[in-house]
Image (tube, rainbow, N blue to C red):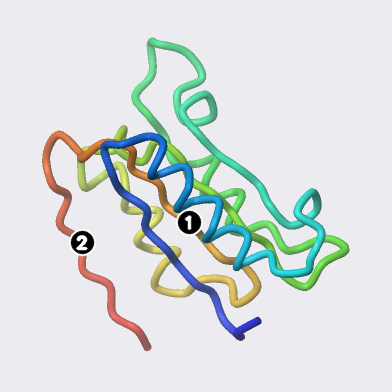
Amino acid sequence: MADGARVVVVKGDDASLVSQALQAIVNELVGGGDRSLMVEEVGEANYVPDSSHEPDLVPLITAVQTPPFLTERRVVIARHMGLFTKQDQVESLVAWLQSPSPTTDLVLVWKRAPLRPVSVRCQRP
């Protein structure tokens, strides 16, 4: 298992292929670890608690900032990222990517292309 955070993007229109790719990636990231302790999934139900609100990344940011418990690493799967189509909606994620937790791997899943591309620049220190 490599040191430092890894961020992987899975994007596609075919749900079956996205699911297969996601499973392979998560299996690689978890390795011989305990999946039930290492993996946390965040999705649409977390981002949009009810239909009267805009999607919010707070649950994802909370997940990636949570330290591992009883394991050396965490794997956070962020599903339904296509919900976020505005730059201001992803600013907290971009800020985390500037200085990610070295013990957390993040898998971002887009099952469909965003309605409008969001342009974000990240620089590694």
Marks 2 & 1, CB-CB < 8 Å contact: no
Judging depth in this view, the residue of 56 and 42 nearest the camera is: 42
Where is residue 96, by image quadrant? bottom left
Instruction: Tell me if mark 2 has few (under 14), some (14-19) or many (20+) residues whose alpha carbon lies within 10 angstroms of its own.
Output: few
Left or right of residue 45, residue 88 in this image:
left
Going by the numbered disc 1, the residue's amino acid type is Val
Q: Residue at x 39, y 53 (%)?
A: 92
Q: Which residue is mark 1?
A: 107
Q: Give the residue at the far right of this rendering.
A: 70
Q: Position of residue 51 (x, y in %)?
A: 40, 11
Judging depth in this view, the residue of 21 and 82 nearest the camera is: 21
31 to 63, vertically: above or below: below
Disc 1 secondary structure class: strand
Left or right of residue 36, residue 107 in this image:
left
Going by the numbered disc 2, the residue's amino acid type is Val
Where is residue 66, by image quadrant? bottom right
Disc 2 secondary structure class: loop
Judging depth in this view, the residue of 29 and 76 nearest the camera is: 29
Q: Position of residue 122 (x, y in %)?
A: 27, 72
Q: Residue at x 59, y 49 (%)?
A: 62
- Check residue 120 in the rendering and tell me which mark sits there, or answer none: 2
Q: Residue at x 33, y 38 (%)?
A: 111
Where is residue 71, by image quadrant? bottom right
Q: Residue at x 40, y 46 (%)?
A: 109
110 to 15, vertically: above or below: below
